[in-house]
Image (tube, rainbow, N blue to C red):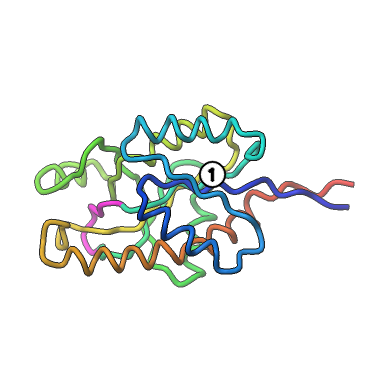
Amino acid sequence: MGHTRPPLLVVCALRIERFALRAGAARGAAHPVTVLRTGMGPTAAEEAVRTALHDPALRGAAVVTTGFCAGLAAGMRPGDIVVSDEGDDSAGLAAALKAAGHTVHTGPLAESDHVVRGAERTALAATGAIAVDMESAAMRRAALAEGAQHIAAARVVVDTPEYELVRVGTLRTGIIAFRVLRDLVPAFLDWHRTTAAPPEVS
C-alpha cells in the first residue's frame, strides 16, 4: 500500500513575495515546495503558470496562488489573510490557515490590472468583493486550463481603506504583511497533505 503526493506549486507575482515564501519553505519543510514568481499583472501571471505546468516535474501539481492584496471590507487589518471562495479547495485552505493561528476572511477576490485606491476601492467593495489583486484570477485560469485539480488562493492584506499604501504607515504595514506571508508555507503544506493527497493504492 502507498501513494505519491503530487507536487505543490506556490505562485506569486513579486520578487519580495518570492523571497518571503522561499524563506518560509526553507524552514525545514519535509515536502518540497516549488515557488514560482510570475511578474506583475494578469498577462504575465497567466503565461508563467501555463509554462510552469508544462514541466513534467510539476505534472498533477496542486496550485496555491498567493502574495499581497488590497483589503476592501471594513474591519480588515494589514496581515489578515483573504482566501478566495472560488472553487472546492477554499474551505480546506482556510481551515489550515486558521489552525495555524492566522486571521482569515473568506470571500470573493476582485481582479484588477492596476493598483486600486480611493473611490475605485469603494466601488469594488460594493460588488461584494472583500479584496482585490492583479494576478490571482489569471493564475487560476491558467491552472484550470492546464488541468490542475486542486487550486486555491490565499492573499495577505497589505493595505486597507484605513491603511492605504500611500500613507505614513506604509513601511510598517508592509513589514507586517511580509512576515505573515513568510509564515504561510506550513499551512499550505498542511492543506496539500489533507486535500491534494491521492487515495492509497495497492
Question: Residue 47 at x, y = what percent?
Answer: 43, 29
Please count the marks in the image. Answer: 1
Give the quarter of the image for residue 146.
top right
Residue 168 vs residue 84, the one in the foreground: 168
User: Please, what is the three-letter code of the amino acid marked with disc 1?
Assistant: Val
Q: In this view, does 108 lie above or below 78?
A: above
Nearer to me, 146 or 36: 36
Drawn side of residue 165 relative to residue 197, left or right: left
Give the magenta-colored segment's residue range. 69-75
| Residue situated furthest top in the rendering | 145
Report the front residue among 147 and 51: 51
Q: What element carries label 1?
A: strand
Residue 72, percent from left and from top: 23, 52
Q: Where is residue 73 in the image (x, y as percent from the top left)?
A: 24, 55
Furthest residue in direction bottom, as rendered = 101
Residue on which disc 1 sits: 63
Percent from the top left, x then y, of residue 104?
Answer: 39, 62
Q: Is residue 41 left or right of residue 61?
A: left
